[in-house]
Image (cartoon, helix red, strand yellow):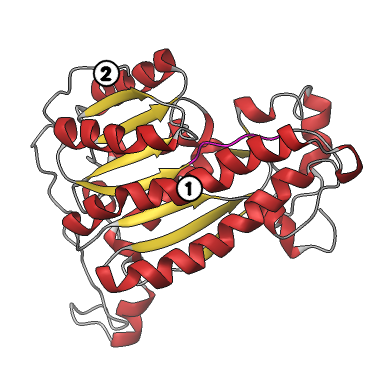
Amino acid sequence: MATTKPVSPKTEKRSRPAESVTGRSGTATATKRDRRSQTRRIPIEHLGSPSTAVVITGGGEGIGEASALRLAEAGRPVAIWDKDAERADEVALACRDRFGTQAIGVAIDVTHTRELDDAVLFTRNNLGVIGGLVHAAGVIRANAIDQLSDEIWDETMAVNLRAAAMLTKALTPALVEATPGSAIVYVSSMDAFVSNKLVSAYDASKAGLLGLTRSAAHALGPSGIRVNAVCPGYVRTQMTDLLFATEAVIDHIATKIPLLRVAEADDIATVIRFLLSDEAAYVTGSSITVDGGVTSTRTS
């Protein structure tokens, strides 16, 4: 298990800018309609509330890494859980150096269920109360149903789906301790809604995460724990490098997307940060599709 020495987070407070309200007549008094139409600016530190630690699986790269950085930016301590100890430590170091936030790397294979309790305890001892989980660890293997092997099916389900359930079970006591404000986000996929014949096990695992989201939200809601899923579309990450092999391929895929661009990991991370924050205090059992509009069209 790889570790890094935690650093105390900065305690500097940012002041909220004063808001000026002007009515239709130019006076200082505005109508209710005017006030509702104004855009409310949320201070960055409020986006990270509560201030409890967040466990991020697969945090060494891609959406997990981007989520760790976004949460650290908002002042939340983060534990980077990843099979790659070096990458976990590098991301934790980046969180500390850039944002002065407590961060540790934890080398772990999340499919090894017996190791989860020890990893939770280690994280708790180093970062304090744990109030969030992001399950971003995932694998994708190209096999249509007529070529599917037991090994590929079992590996995909173990990482993408079973680990999510077992992590939730292992972290529930800590999340109950941290309430109010505890929350879980599973990283699913637009493939939970639209099929890809070449990745049958992946599609099944991501659809299964949505069922787990609803069930876990139902079970844990009375304890004050919210559970949601994000469903990314086409995202440029290390896992999708083969798909986005050339700029020509990227441009072609972008033509299928109403927003006409492929997402970056940070596009997903900002939504994850929102779902973990108090701004989403009444959102649970939901799946948020972040795909640039792909699933709103007839074909993907």
Q: Position of residue 16 (x, y in %)?
A: 16, 53
- Identify the residue under disc 2: 3
For residue 164, the mark is 1
Q: Quadrant of residue 87?
A: top left
Residue 291 visible to an observer of this rendering: no
Mark 1 Cα within 10 Å, few/some/many (few <14, many 20+)?
many
Label disc, if present, on residue 199 of the rendered structure: none
Q: Label 1 is placed on what type of residue? A: Ala
Under circle 2, the secondary element is loop
Q: Residue sitting at 56 percent across and 48 percent down?
A: 161
Residue pictured at 46% horizontal, 18% vertical: 84
Amino acid type, mark 2: Thr
- Is residue 137 highlighted in magenta? yes
In what quadrant of the picture does the N terminus appear? Answer: top left
Q: Magenta stretch?
A: 136-140
Q: Is residue 56 above or below residue 212?
A: above
